[in-house]
Image (cartoon, rainbow, N blue to C red):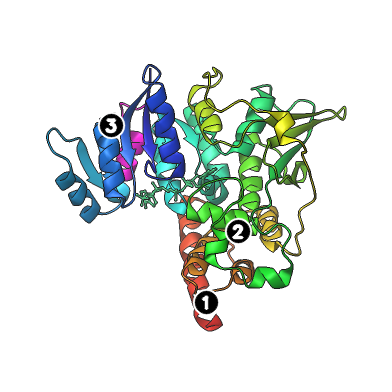
Amino acid sequence: MKKLSILGSTGSIGTATLKVCAAHPEKFRVAGLAAGKNVRLIADQVRAFKPQLVCMASETAAAALKAALAGKKPEIVWGSNGLEKVAAMAEADMVVSAISGSAGLLPTLAAVSAGKDVALANKEALVMAGEFLIAEAARRNVRIVPVDSEHSAIAQILNSRGLDGVRRLLLTASGGPFLRYTRRQLAGVTPKQALKHPRWKMGNKVTIDSATLMNKGLEVIEARWLFGVPPEQIQVVIHPESIIHSMVEFVDGSVLAHLSEPDMKGPIAYALSCPERIADIVKPLNLASVGRLTFMEPDEKRFPALRLACGALAAGGMMPAVMNAANEIAVRSFLKKRISFSAIAKLVMRVMEAFYYRGSINLEAILWADGWARSESEKIIAKMQ
Ligand SMILES: NC(=O)c1ccc[n+]([C@@H]2O[C@H](COP(=O)([O-])OP(=O)(O)OC[C@H]3O[C@@H](n4cnc5c(N)ncnc54)[C@H](OP(=O)(O)O)[C@@H]3O)[C@@H](O)[C@H]2O)c1
């Protein structure tokens, strides 16, 4: 029986994780839950899974949850201290890190530092502080297991064999809803259009990132740290059908691919139970009904966010954290209709160009860079209007 703390339990990954837990009560028990402000949903989750400890983002949300629960209640905490408490709670064997955005970094780090294995969906933690997080995981002898379908695919292909004989990691990308749009069409797309992903039902931030291809850029950085490969050995391939979740090319020219129906319960269940596999998680793949699998190169002219993310990785230091923070502000501003779709990458580029730092790189400096990039982004947006 594995006991889990789930950070971001009311989100797309969090609810899919709880579906896996509900289907396999003999394998998983929920020890802790954390969410932002969706009191109604987390109250249902508390009733169904009976965790010992629950965290909400604010004191108000925590009070509302207390009021919503009758009878015996779990301990309810709130804010960043509460989140770290759920991440590090003694009763949990593994922490599912599924908060979206940079808010996931500190609790993920708290989980690793407390010696917990982490099933990691929050790619932003690795983008901001990958080197730091991986070193801490090695020091504490804990595993960071990917939940992202692409990285799960690569981990399953490598199967703990390491990188011997590996030439390249080939990350697949659906290309998002605007794969065939011209630059002119892209300039005019609305949040409603951008939130309609053709293959995956996900939270708003990652859905917009998928439409700009920033998501794939974040995943390149994630792969660099998870698998310890240099950036030039990671290539992105557009594959609109989302049946191949990623591939590994070996030195002899062989390429191994991981295929399944696109359903996040697959990589989630694998992250929770690997190397063991749980039966009947994802519906069987019928290749004849899929028919054709197609591939193409990403167009970095129409989707410059991918190039920006790769540039941030090449620049190193705190540039990925700066890029990530600027992107978060840009996505939020696009969703509030303050900037256009095309302005997302433009804003990220301007913030990256304005960043200059020569001091040492540590967690404090990374958090400072994150804050600097957010206020710089706001200044630029104010001038854009
Ligand atoms: N969705 C996917 O298919 C998918 C696939 C691969 C990777 N990922 C990654 O997984 C992460 C989560 O994605 P998602 O799609 O599940 O996002 P989502 O649906 O937006 O869910 C985000 C979760 O984080 C919680 N949250 C946000 N801010 C918080 C804070 N300050 N404190 C505590 N909880 C907070 C939200 O709570 P409330 O809703 O209660 O406010 C919600 O439970 C992202 O990093 C994403 O890139 C997602």
Few, some or many residues within 10 Å of mark 2 (<14, 14–19, 20+): many
Where residue 383 sits in the image (x, y, percent)?
Answer: 53, 83
- View extreme (right): residue: 252
Q: What residue lies at 51% left-to-right and 61% top-to-bottom?
A: 328
Taking depth in this image into account, of 139 and 44 the one nearest to the observer is 44
Percent of width and height locating residue 236: 74, 46
What segment carries the magenta color? 83-93
Residue that appears at 61% across and 68% down: 189
Q: Tell me the residue at 64%/22% (across/down).
A: 160
Q: Quadrant of residue 267?
A: top right
Q: Which residue is mark 3?
A: 48
- The residue sitting at 34% across, 50% down in the picture is 36
Sequence-earlier tag: 2 or 1:
2
Q: Position of residue 357 (x, y in %)?
A: 58, 64
Residue 19 against residue 182 in the figure, above or below: above
Residue 310 or residue 35, whichever sits in front: 35
Q: Residue furthest front?
A: 289
Q: Quadrant of the N terminus?
A: top left
Residue 353 position, x and y percent, is: 64, 70
As for residue 92 lying within the magenta part, the answer is yes
Mark 3–mark 1 Cα distance, whole angstroms, equals 44 Å
**Disc marking residue 363:** none
Question: On the image, numbered disc 2 is attached to which residue?
Answer: 319
**What is the spatial separation of the Cα atoms under label 2 and label 1, in whole angstroms?**
20 Å
Q: Are marks 3 and 1 in contact (CB under 8 Å)?
A: no
Near mark 3 (Cα within 10 A), the count class, few <14, some 14-19 or many ≥20, is few
Question: What residue does disc 1 label?
Answer: 381
SS under mark 1:
helix
